[in-house]
Image: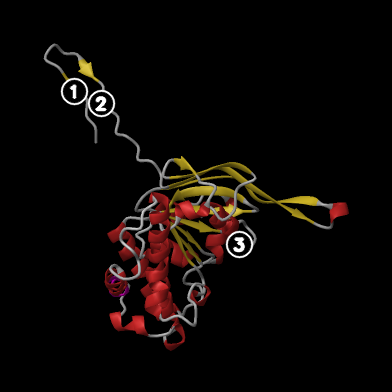
Amino acid sequence: MNQMSIHRDGSVEPPTPTPTPTPVLELDRASVVFPSGPPWRRRRVPAMREVTLQVSAGETLGVVGESGSGKTTTAMVALGLRRPTTGVVRFEGASMPRRRRALAGRMQVVLQHPQWSLDPRMRVGRSVAEPLVVAERLARRAANTTSGAINGSSSGSITDAVAVMLEKVGLDASVAKRHPHELSGGQRQRVAIARALITRPRFVVFDEAVSALDVSVQAQILNLVVDVQAEYGFGALFISHDLGAVRYVAHRIAVMRHGCVVETADTETFYRTPEHEYSRQLLEAL
């Protein structure tokens, strides 16, 4: 904590303010409107209404709300997959780039069903390596150089990186030689997390990442999320309708309803004394 400096002549020097770290991700009054209905009766349906959120490095923001509250649209905007109709999205202090490839390896997502991100025809090792291969290829193009080719000299280093990452998520390196259908649901989700983290991203979205798993497996995956975030320091959105899971991993909670954020609070405060009536209803249901 900053302290005031008192000089010998009795004058007081005010404390030097601690610089506020730039959020990894920031949504500033972001809104999304979808067209609906036939062309002769077109109407505009808001999916997000001036949503303002911030996520810092090493922090998980839990986003909760019932189906249709705008959680998934918020995730798509945060990942740069959909541009907001109005408002601003910033990643590491800069406006979100128009080309998604500029974010390759810097943002990742873990989905509800791991098979959505794992090609059943690919062995696990190749699936985990794919984001790293793509990110390095795009980086070489941006630098207009062919040094450090992915195929050949660096193939061994990528294989090593995959083995290390599989072990980080609690899987034996030999899993790299197997296909997704040969694994359990929990193992597949661990592979999906390894695939998301192989590029050491700065920001990760977990979109209902444990809702399709058995309760005992959920606990293992939630522990894994906490552990790998502590090690790698990425910022995260954890989107779920399961308030129990969110409570375990999130540092702060944002409650969404009808496309709006109706309450944001640190996790302990939210679960002890929620302010909004809708938040209290969600907790009562839990």
Pointer 2 with pointer 1, Cβ within 8 A? yes
Q: Earlier in the sequence, mark 2 or mark 1?
A: 1
Q: Which residues are magenta?
A: 164-168
Q: In the rendered structure, does residue 167 fall within the stretch colored magenta?
A: yes
Please name whichever residue, 230 or 80, is drawn nearer the observer in this view of the structure. 80
Q: Amino acid at mark 3?
A: Glu
Please name whichever residue, 97 or 189, is drawn nearer the observer in this view of the structure. 97
Measured from the top left, where is residue 3 in percent x and y? Answer: 22, 29
Measured from the top left, where is residue 173 in percent x and y? Answer: 29, 80
Q: Quadrant of residue 180?
A: bottom left
On the image, numbered disc 3 is attached to which residue?
66
On the image, numbered disc 1 is attached to which residue?
5
Residue at x-position 47% and y-position 69%:
209
Q: Spatial distance from mark 2 to mark 3, Cα to Cα? A: 45 Å
Q: Quadrant of residue 193?
A: bottom left
Q: In the rendered structure, does residue 275 fall within the stretch colored magenta?
A: no
Residue at x-position 14% and y-position 17%:
7
Mark 3 residue element:
loop
Which secondary structure type mostly characterizes the magenta part of the structure? helix
**Residue 273 versus residue 28 in the image, above or below:** below
